[in-house]
Image: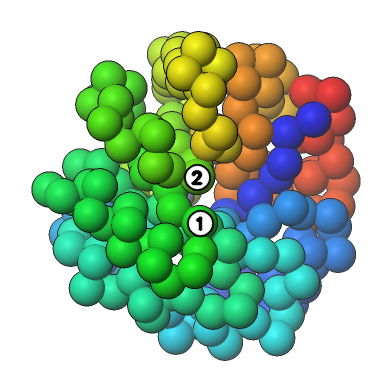
Amino acid sequence: MAKIAPSILAADFAKLGSEVADICDGGCDYIHVDVMDGAFVPNISFGSAVMKSLNIYATAPYDVHLMIENPDQYLEEFVTENTEYITVHYEACPHICRTISHIKEQGVKAGVSINPGTPVSCLEAVLPFVDMVLVMSVNPGFGGQQFIPETAEKVAELNKLRQTKGYSFEIEVDGGVSDKNAGLLASNGADILVAGSAVFKHEDRAEAIMKIKQIDA
Ligand code: DX5
Ligand code: ZN
């Protein structure tokens, strides 16, 4: 059964505290924190101050997804007692291995993400060092987009690579995930499914979380 990381980008920002409490009570495994800078992606979301203010409501760990240029400059800001993963984009990091080391030096787990247009082969050199690979299944920048089916193949490719090479990274999928594709993604090897709209646009968040979890059971 895959773990579920609801993205708070789809939450009601006017009541973010209770939205976070709601998904935690609803049994989420992580809280997916989408940080956008208006440069790497064509949208601005929120920064570390907003995330830190949610610590008092968060009983699940943060899974921080940095969709920003020059992430090395801001990494420390996202390290809190509640941060488990910090993920950066391969496309935003000219020195990806150095950035991954930098994240680990902060005492948190390090993830690397690839856009739909970036092949898995680009990650070859960094795979031995990462704790997670985040496969983007939409072009990053916005919630509520349609899942790109071809990206499910990348999950299978990564799963095969980690088996043959003995790597231990988790595979996460982000973008347009719902109960319609959760089964396929989990059977291809996904460990963590990010779901924004599929959880927050649902009145009963616990039910929405369970629906995705059960479908791939
Ligand atoms: C996209 C974000 C995703 C997004 C997921 O740039 O990284 O995490 O919020 O939202 P849904 O599930 O609505 O596609
Ligand atoms: Zn995300």
Q: Taking 149 as reference, is 192 left or right?
A: right
Report x, y in % for residue 131: 50, 45
Report x, y in % for residue 182: 68, 25
As displayed, is residue 65 above or below residue 144?
below
Please name the residue shown 62% across and 21% down the image.
189
| Quarter holding residue 23 | bottom right
Report crowding for label 2: few under 14, some 14 to 19, many 20 or more residues within 10 A (C-alpha).
many
| Quarter holding residue 28 | bottom right
Q: Which residue is mark 2?
A: 131
Image quarter where the N terminus lies is top right
Mark 2 near mark 1, Cβ–Cβ under 8 Å? yes
Report crowding for label 1: few under 14, some 14 to 19, many 20 or more residues within 10 A (C-alpha).
some
Q: Identity of the amino acid at label 1?
A: Lys
As displayed, is residue 69 above or below residue 208?
below
Instruction: Assign a secondary structure to mark 1.
Output: strand
Q: Which residue is mark 1?
A: 109
* Precedes in sequence: disc 2 or disc 1: 1
Decide which of 150, 114 is in the foreground and name it: 114
Report x, y in % for residue 181: 64, 21
Q: Taking 67 as reference, is 19 left or right?
A: right
Report x, y in % for residue 171: 54, 33
Q: Taking 90 as reference, is 199 left or right?
A: right
Residue 20 seen by the camera = yes
Please name the residue shown 53% across and 36% down the image.
169
Q: Identity of the amino acid at label 2?
A: Asp
Residue 45 seen by the camera = no
As displayed, is residue 137 above or below residue 19?
above
In this view, the residue farthest toward the left is: 94
Q: How many marks can you see?
A: 2
C-alpha distance separating marks 2 and 1:
6 Å
